Image (cartoon, grey):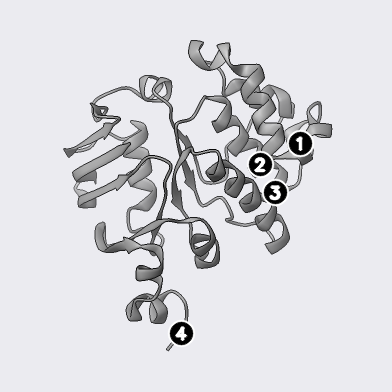
Amino acid sequence: MLEVQDLHVNYGLFEAVKGISLEVRDNETVALLGPNGHGKSTILRAISGLIRPRSGTIAFNSTKISQLKPPDIVKMGVIQVPEGGHLFPEMTVKENLMLGAYSPEAWKHREVNMHKVLEIFPNLRDKMSRLCLNLSGGERRAVAVGRGLMSAAKLLMLDEPSLGLSPLLAQEVMRGIRNIKATGIGILLVEENTRYIRELADRIYLIEQGKVALEGEKEEVLENSYIKKAYLGIV
């Protein structure tokens, strides 16, 4: 589905991503684990076309997208839900969701996709006319993910979906993401909470200092002695 090869990304003279290669296979959830500021979000932004890579290739379903503009990447079904969601607070839940269906292909399927969103996040059903500024943090995050689904996502890239949420609200959002996973949509997940990574991921890439420090199947990575000590607090 997604193939990233030898990706280098700079912010001016600072090299944030240093030759990373990764892949997301069909119907797979892949997690990027690692400290803040080590390149995980930059990888997502490069895949989305928001940052132009210095070098390397990004391909989606065998089509190179490294040099495409973000709207063209979205039309292919590669959708990023950024950290925090970035909703329009003065617009309603329904209006924010419908913004996700702006492309011609997504617009044709807006009713079907809306039905899917409300099946995945049923708590939004009675809040469609509510302004997003009046929602809880978990509800706002659900709207942000739902807006991504309205874009007819084939690969959904989620940047820290549980960040800043209480444990209860985070669990509700993650329950929705588990439901998305069950539909077969590919997911590339940036997440600091290893509990949710354990629940959702099929494979994990550990990103440190802009490089892949470790990769493998979920259980293989989470049982690694370095991961246990540095990320799980197990000595």
Q: Disc 1, disc 2: CB below 8 Å? A: yes
Q: Quadrant of residue 88?
A: top right
Q: CA distance from mark 1 to mark 4?
A: 38 Å
| Residue 201 position within the rendered picture, expressed as x and y whole percent measured from the top left | 46, 56
Residue matched to label 3:
138
Residue type, label 4: Ile
Q: Helix, strand or loop at disc 3? A: helix
Q: CA distance from mark 3 to mark 2?
A: 6 Å
Q: Is residue 143 above or below residue 181?
A: above
Q: CA distance from mark 1 to mark 3?
A: 11 Å
Image quadrant holding the C terminus, namely: bottom left
- Crowd rating for badge 2 (residues with CA inside 10 Å; few <14, some 14–19, many 20+): many
Residue type, label 1: Leu
- Which of the two labelled residues, at mark 1 and mark 4, occupies the earlier sequence position? 1
Q: Is residue 189 visible?
A: yes
- State the residue in front, 62 or 139: 62
Q: Helix, strand or loop at disc 4? A: loop
Q: Disc 3, disc 2: CB below 8 Å? A: yes
